Image: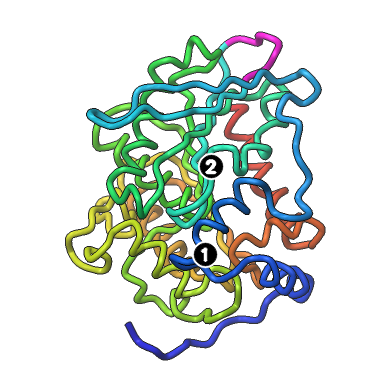
Amino acid sequence: MSETTPSRPPFDPELVPVIEAQRAVMPPLGADTLGALRDLIASGLPGMPETDLTAGGAVVVEELTVPGPEGAPEIALTVLRPARETGPLPGIYHVHGGGMVMGTRHVGLAGFVGYVAEGLAVAVSVEYRLAPEHPDPAPVEDCYAGLRWFAGNAAALGADPERLMILGGSAGGGLAAGTALLARDRGFPRLTHQVLICPMLDDRMTTPSSRMLDGEGVWDRDDNLFGWTALLGDRRGTEAVSCYAAPARAEDLSGLPRTYLDVGSVETFRDEAIDYALRLSQAGVNVDFHLWGGGYHGFEAASQSAIAQASAATRDEFLRRALET
């Protein structure tokens, strides 16, 4: 990997103070900080309000334990469903982010409460095993096991097994893409959509964007190297990595569901996301792709900024169309 740092676009001016504040509370990712970062993310980042997942009683929250992959431990799922029975609804299967090494199934779950409270969907979020304690293929196989269980038990949850989408951000976006590939190749379930938010797709780190951020505090090349190495060990960057672990390696992207994919222009995953969107489209998949100028990895957390609001509104419009068709 070259030591040269390629040029990068400027950050959106509204985001610069947020980046500086984030850098002040989030140490660089490494073996010595992983435990503290896990605790910080699990307890909620400073300044982030807690969300009532029940939406004042409109949503039923269930914590379930279901079978994991064959020969592996059970996995935990959190289910959100409308308190009022409204018939079979589309299902959203959520895979949390965290660089393959952090996060829990509750991270990001608040983003689906509104859809469930409105009676538009049933949402399920999966707790997959984390690297480095549980390297590939444990995380993606856990995600697939949870999806398979959701599809097989959809009716009992008030969901339609023929109307399931998968959604994930960052590492969760990469795992969602890998899980969609597994579902296609194993023939079950059939997904209607995949929503990949700034997805972590390529372990090889050869693109300009994968090397353009150094010490910026926004998932730079060192963070990326740590996450991929935790997942893959000595296999990282070699030909011994499957497309289910690193979906950018997939040679055949045909037969995948309609895809929503977005990414910031100033983030490590930019180029691999652009390439994945292009190759999906060339393989005959309908793709809605958005490149947000000036956005860094996770810029949506700066919810008062114009760029974050535009991104959220665009994704919400897509999700509502997907849920209502």
Seen at 68% across and 55% down, the residue is 311
**Mark 1 or mark 2, which is nearer the start of the sequence?**
1
Residue 47 location (% of width, % of height): 78, 54
Amino acid tagged 1: Thr
Q: Relative to 295, is 281 above or below?
A: above
> How far from the left and from the top, in percent, is residue 99?
47, 57
The residues bearing labels 2 and 1 have C-alpha atoms spaced at a distance of: 17 Å
Res. 234 image quadrant: bottom left
Q: Position of residue 9 (x, y in %)?
A: 61, 81
What residue is pinned by disc 1? 33
Q: Position of residue 255 (x, y in %)?
A: 32, 40
Q: Residues within 10 Å of mark 2 (few under 14, many from 20)?
A: many
Q: Say above or below: 158 vs 162.
A: above
Q: Is residue 40 left or right of residue 239?
A: right
Residue 166 magenta-drawn? no
Residue span colored magenta: 81-87
Is the stretch drawn in magenta largely helix, strand or loop? loop
What residue did someone put label 2 on? 104
**Quick check: is 82 in the magenta stretch?**
yes
Q: Quadrant of residue 239?
A: bottom left
Q: Nearer the viewer, mark 2 or mark 1?
A: 1
- Toward the bottom, the furthest residue is 4
Residue that appears at 62% across and 20% down? 81
Is residue 316 visible in this depiction of the protein?
yes
The answer to whether residue 260 is visible is: no
Amino acid type at mark 2: Thr
